[in-house]
Amino acid sequence: MAGQVGSVAVVLGGSMAGSLAARVLSESYENVLVLDRDTVLGVTKPRKGTPHTRHAHGLHARGQRILEDFFPGFTDDLRAAGAPVGDLGEMRWYFNGLRLPYTHTGLVSVTPTRPVLENHVRTRVNALPNVTYLEQHDILGLVSTSDNQRVIGVRVRDDAGVEKVLSADLVLDATGRGSRTPAWLEQLGYARPTEDRVKIGLAYTTRFYRRPAGSFTDTWSINPVASPAHPRGAFFGLSDEDTCIVSLTGILGDHPPTDPEGFVEFAKSLPVPDVYDGIKDAEPLDDPTSFGFPASVRRRYEHLDRFPAGLLVLGDAICSFNPVYGQGMSVAAWEAFTLREHLRNGEVDQYAYFRDIGQVVDAPWAVSASGDLAFPGVEGERTPEIEQGNAFMGMLQYAASKDQEIVKAFMRVAGLIDPPTALMDETLVQRVLSHQPAEGADGQAA
């Protein structure tokens, strides 16, 4: 248990990143206030402030392990509540239209709907005696000392329309990709962080179905992953024992339709029939709904040489990844774990914190950004390293369809346990090369 660092910490945003930050801060601050503009406690459905939570999400490997550390018994509680929990390698994965063999990896994946998962987290955090959620509070801006050297609170408007200042020893921004910290820094006389962007022009379209009788007997999730050769993708799985979620994905303007007939036809166009066959006669429970994701964005706070004391940033407010890689919640958990390590040394050295958070983000950003740049229409610099890495990834995914040991190594990277460089292990590379088809043979990976 960390020693007390301060009296009051205020967290902006009550979603996954903010709630995990509050869990960590509760060990080091006498009181932690979590502000959100919505009602968040007890909510198990998508809400106005987080429309993306309606679509397919997953908490994979590293994220699951960290949440289990923060909340002992968390995974068993979800399983007992009917949430889908299983081995990451025992999902039905397709890459370039080729199926990976079911492989026990020991890496746990948790895939209820995002609101259900967040509700389990918030319920645990809200039970902490020194954490309070302040719902229906609009965040108006930061409050600083007269010389702007330190943030000392936040201005808010409560649900009665009353504006007030909440004093704080620390303010942590976990408001997501729409974070206003860059603008607030500028108002205080600091530089904005530079940004890296990869424009993917992604859209999800999601629909829920009643689970067809006899379905999902050998897995709980079927995932034809988009690739340059097959740029349409899908995530089709159980969201609870009786309900299926189907999220179709398309990039660069080729977006899945929201009319029911077009939705099914898009599913039929996928390189494998599993999704179409699963939904063509299934009972829909709602209408298709779409969500757009124009670009992955990484804000480089670690490059700033001036920053006001008393302010931190975490989660999508630092880096918002292309969601098809399933990294966001797990990276937020990893960042919260990193924050805890800094707090155990006393008041956080912000420059060291942002440096370490940058290192946390490096590997998942490399996976996401490099993977997106494999698609010819995506704008961005393709260094020789990226081009070579993407070429090798195609070879590895092909080889993984033949070799469970390669699946294990690949899933450790996908689950954020190992960095992408682990796939360049000499023994693994030789194994990948040994499975490549003769030149020109059918099924060669793109």
Image (cartoon, rainbow, N blue to C red):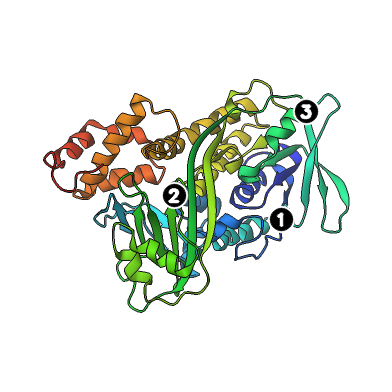
Question: How far across and how far down the image is residue 360, in percent?
Answer: 49, 35
Residue 59 vs residue 67, the one in the foreground: 59
| Residue furthest to the left | 438
**Residue at the spot of label 1:** 129
Q: Do the residues labelled 2 and 3 touch (CB within 8 Å)?
A: no
Q: Which amino acid does label 2 sit on?
A: Val
- Disc 3 designates what residue? 188
How many C-alpha atoms fall within 10 Å of the one at disc 1: few (<14), some, or many (≥20)? few
Horizontal relation, residue 166 to residue 217: left or right:
right
- Tell me what residue is drawn at x 43 percent, y 58 percent: 248
Q: Nearer the viewer, residue 428 or 271?
A: 271
Image quarter hosting the C terminus: top left
Closer to the eye: label 2 or 1: 2
Eye-nearest disc, 3 or 1: 3
Quarter placement of the N terminus: top right
In percent of width and height, residue 95 lies at 29, 50
| Sequence-wise first label, 2 or 3 | 3
Task: Give me the C-alpha separation between circle 2 and circle 1.
Answer: 36 Å
- At x 33%, y 60%, the residue is 269
Q: Quadrant of residue 412?
A: top left
Judged from the image, the secondary structure of the residue bearing numbered disc 3 is loop
Does the residue at mark 2 contact the one at mark 1 (Cβ under 8 Å)? no
- In the image, residue 123 above or below residue 356: below
Image-based side of 298 in relation to 273, left or right: right
Q: Identity of the amino acid at label 3?
A: Leu
| Mark with earlier residue (3, 1) | 1
Of label 2 and label 1, which has the lower sequence position?
Answer: 1
For mark 1, give the secondary structure: loop
Callout 2: helix, strand or loop? helix
- Answer yes or no: is residue 219 visible: no
- Mark seen at residue 288: none
Tag of residue 324 = 2
